[in-house]
């Protein structure tokens, strides 16, 4: 059987992930993502009203024209998890393919919301829910399997396409977490089995976000412990404390809510995406928040919540807000500019339970946000966080478990691939033979 891989997006940057695997006459598309930084550098861009061609020209979504070179039919579109760099282009591109969108429960709910918000295109693809550990047939000879992984969002999976020539493992995005705060640990047992059954692993496509960092990525339980320590240290502070994290990081949000109550403060979730992700997780039963937890997304309701906090005393509340990357229209950035009823006073605490995404737009905006907050007297608690991506030793463990015949680094630029190339080379892989460093729009023929 001919096996071909089209590396469509996410092979020159972190963002707009999209990869297609052709096994015989069957094609499976993994991820259709958005490069958010390409959107944020423009003021007031509303992607839901834009045409896909304009977004492709901006470099915001994958240029999927290479798909016309693949001789076969798309049988499934498979997003690995609910981050926008993996699902943000589904509403722009999925309607071009007569194929169902297959995803885990939380990811599928987020995909539904993306489709509902879309103003330009009608996306009528069937939506198929599949849990980790389940399989489905792809054509007559191939099978799709979801393997449970841990990441900075719940319900993340690594899809595996089983073909007569061996398995194709799409390894975006994960960390090796054996003690997660929500959900099951990463299923390393299944990865080891896949590496040793039938024809083994023909190809492993790997997320290289942290491949240049030595050691291993700590568990979310480590971030939880760090966060609890920081918040307990502020228990006696009688002024304002504000926290921000990734809205999609449900495990971190639940920790913030829990620890706020431990130190006698009422948590309030503020910001459109904060309400969206936490509300969705609660609605599908993935998490249980206190019945009286306030979640406010619309500008007016957010400002009313801020007014209530100011009237009843900042010392009684913990606002958990959007804006950890300094996004211009997010809540924390508006607070830093003095555009909300919340007054930051000298000595007030701001906890960034997130790291800066290493990309120039984010780094510049985060720097500006911190400076604005500091000018108002805020004290910054930075990087109360652990990454959702493997470091070097995690990558070594995955290569050892899967023992793939071919490896394709993804989810980075050329500089970001370097650490992974060094590691794979030390394990016997050779550039141009079975280690394929590629770019967007290329096709790799494996069989």
Image (cartoon, rainbow, N blue to C red):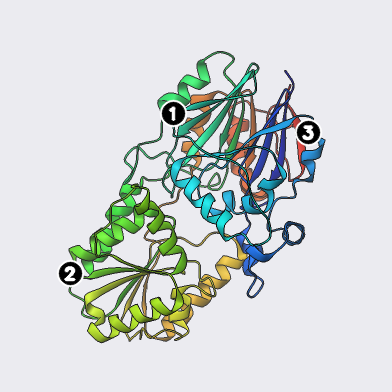
Helix, strand, or loop for circle 2?
A: loop
Residue 63: percent from left, percent from top: 75, 50
When the figure is inspected, residue 6 is found, relative to residue 280, above or below; the finding is above
Residue at the farthest top position:
198
Return the residue at label 3.
70
Cβ–Cβ under 8 Å for marks 2 and 1: no
Return the residue at label 2.
264
Q: Nearer the viewer, residue 169 or 231?
A: 169
Q: Earlier in the sequence, mark 2 or mark 1?
A: 1
Could you give the CA–CA distance between mark 2 and mark 1, rounded to whole angstroms? Answer: 41 Å
Residue 278: percent from left, percent from top: 38, 58
Label 3 Cα crowd, 10 Å radius (few <14 / some 14-19 / many 20+): some
The residue drawn where x is 39% and y is 76% is 302
When the figure is inspected, residue 439 is found, relative to residue 365, above or below; the finding is above
Label 1 Cα crowd, 10 Å radius (few <14 / some 14-19 / many 20+): few
| Left or right relative to 215: residue 432 | right
Could you give the CA–CA distance between mark 3 and mark 1, rounded to whole angstroms? Answer: 29 Å
The label shown at residue 133 is 1
Q: Nearer the viewer, mark 2 or mark 1?
A: 1
| Left or right relative to 159: residue 270 | left
Label 2 Cα crowd, 10 Å radius (few <14 / some 14-19 / many 20+): some
Q: Quadrant of residue 48?
A: bottom right
């Amino acid at each position: 059987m001919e096996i071909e891989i089209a590396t469509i997006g996410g092979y020159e940057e972190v963002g707009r992930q999209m990869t297609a695997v052709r096994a015989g006459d069957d094609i499976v598309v993994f991820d259709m993502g958005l490069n958010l930084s390409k959107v944020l550098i423009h003021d007031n861009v509303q992607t839901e009203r834009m045409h896909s061609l304009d977004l492709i020209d901006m470099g915001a979504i994958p240029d999927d024209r290479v798909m016309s070179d693949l001789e076969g039919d798309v049988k499934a579109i498979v997003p690995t998890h609910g981050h926008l760099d993996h699902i943000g282009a589904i509403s722009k591109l999925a309607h071009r393919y007569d194929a169902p969108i297959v995803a885990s429960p939380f990811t599928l709910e987020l995909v539904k919301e993306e489709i509902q918000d879309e103003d330009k295109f009608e996306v009528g693809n069937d939506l198929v829910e599949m849990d980790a550990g389940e399989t489905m047939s792809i054509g007559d000879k191939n099978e799709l399997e979801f393997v449970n992984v841990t990441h900075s969002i719940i319900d993340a999976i690594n899809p595996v396409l089983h073909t007569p020539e061996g398995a194709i493992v799409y390894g975006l995005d994960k960390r090796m977490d054996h003690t997660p705060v929500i959900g099951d640990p990463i299923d390393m047992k299944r990865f080891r089995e896949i590496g040793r059954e039938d024809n083994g692993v023909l190809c492993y496509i790997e997320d290289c976000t942290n491949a240049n960092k030595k050691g291993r990525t700590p568990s979310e339980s480590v971030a939880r412990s760090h966060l609890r320590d920081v918040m307990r240290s502020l228990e006696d502070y009688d002024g304002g404390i504000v926290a921000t994290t990734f809205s999609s990081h449900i495990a971190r949000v639940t920790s913030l809510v829990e620890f706020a109550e431990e130190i006698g403060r009422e948590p309030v979730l503020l910001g459109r995406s904060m309400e969206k992700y936490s509300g969705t997780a609660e609605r599908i039963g993935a998490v249980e928040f206190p019945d009286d937890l306030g979640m406010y997304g619309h500008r007016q309701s957010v400002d009313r919540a801020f007014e209530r906090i100011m009237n009843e005393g900042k010392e009684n509340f913990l606002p958990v807000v959007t804006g950890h990357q300094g996004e211009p229209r997010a809540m924390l950035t508006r607070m830093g500019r003095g555009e909300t009823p919340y007054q930051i006073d000298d000595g007030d605490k701001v906890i960034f339970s997130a790291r800066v995404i290493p990309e120039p737009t984010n780094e510049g905006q985060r720097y500006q946000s911190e400076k604005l907050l500091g000018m108002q007297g805020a004290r910054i608690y930075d990087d109360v966080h652990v990454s959702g991506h493997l470091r070097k030793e995690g990558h070594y463990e995955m290569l050892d478990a899967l023992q793939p015949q071919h490896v394709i680094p993804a989810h980075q630029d050329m500089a970001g691939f370097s650490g992974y190339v060094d590691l794979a080379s030390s394990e016997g892989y050779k550039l141009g033979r079975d280690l394929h460093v590629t770019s967007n729009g290329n096709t790799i023929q494996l069989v």
